[in-house]
Amino acid sequence: MKIILRILTTAALIVVIASCGNEKEASKLLGEAKAFYLKSDFITAKHLIDSVNLMFPREIKVRREALTLMRLVNKGESEQNIAYCDSLLPIRVAELDGLKKGFVFEKDSAYDEQGTYIWKAMTVEKNVERSYIRCGVNEEGEMYMASVFFGGKPLEHTGLKLSVKDGAYAQTPAIPYDGGVNYRFKDNGNTTEVVTYKGENCKTIANFVVIIDPKERIKAEYTGGKPFSLYLSDVDKTAIKATYELAMTLSEINNLKKIKDKSEKVIQLIDSKLNNEAGKENEETK
């Protein structure tokens, strides 16, 4: 609300100043922007700088000063972002160390660019020749769930629906057979099918498991092929919820690192431009 009032007040000021349209008034408006910059009110400062360029297009000298100030504002914002990331990252990393204790980390260096965290009870080795809902999360925080079927006759399923007794449900989009995220094979007369739901395709069903009362029985129906269903065990629900929490933490940590990295690069670029400008000014004054 305070920001909206400032912008409205600024807009009224601009209307008055625009009627004059000279260097003195342009400098006055830029001075207002500098004052907000010094108070670290970067949003209002940016708005005022934009107004200088809009209302006084012919005041080249003032606009040049406005450009320098805008760079300082952007640098200030980036420094603020870095400070924010530095304050949160140690906290989230400490949380991550605790969350990872229930998982094993799997990565095939020959094939995988990223490793995957899998709940200890969910590893493939512990679930051979079994129909179940598998889940995991990669190092960037992208979660996946997979409907695994093992049986004599193929289902040729393409999706997964989770539901509870009162009729509430969540469902994935259909994942057509492609031999990749939807694949199937036969071995010794038995069929194995695995359909994997990643990212957004996984989000709805993962959220469903997280918000449903742990005491509720959750039915998992394999859709798009022959009818088949099972109920999630307590271990399944625990694994999905733990994986979801780990995914959220990993995702936040990666986002914070990206914001910090981007902000550092912005500062480097701005410093380079400011130094070049300072060098040119020194040459001109000689």
Image: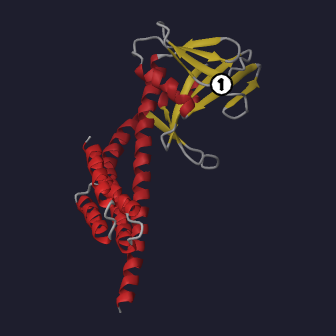
Q: Report which residue position mark 1 lands on.
A: 174
Q: Quadrant of the N terminus?
A: top left
Amino acid found under the numbered disc labelled 1 = Ala
- The one nearer the camera, 209 or 1, is 1
Residue under the image location 32 percent in, 54 percent down: 15
Residue 138 to residue 177: above or below: below
Q: Is residue 152 left or right of residue 251?
A: right
Q: Position of residue 272 (x, y in %)?
A: 42, 73
Residue 132: image quadrant is top right
Residue 258 to residue 278: above or below: above
Residue under the image location 25 percent in, 61 percent down: 32
Residue under the image location 34 percent in, 51 percent down: 85
Residue 231 to residue 12: above or below: above
Specify the color scheme. secondary structure
Q: Quadrant of the C terminus?
A: bottom left
Q: Position of residue 147 (x, y in %)?
A: 60, 23
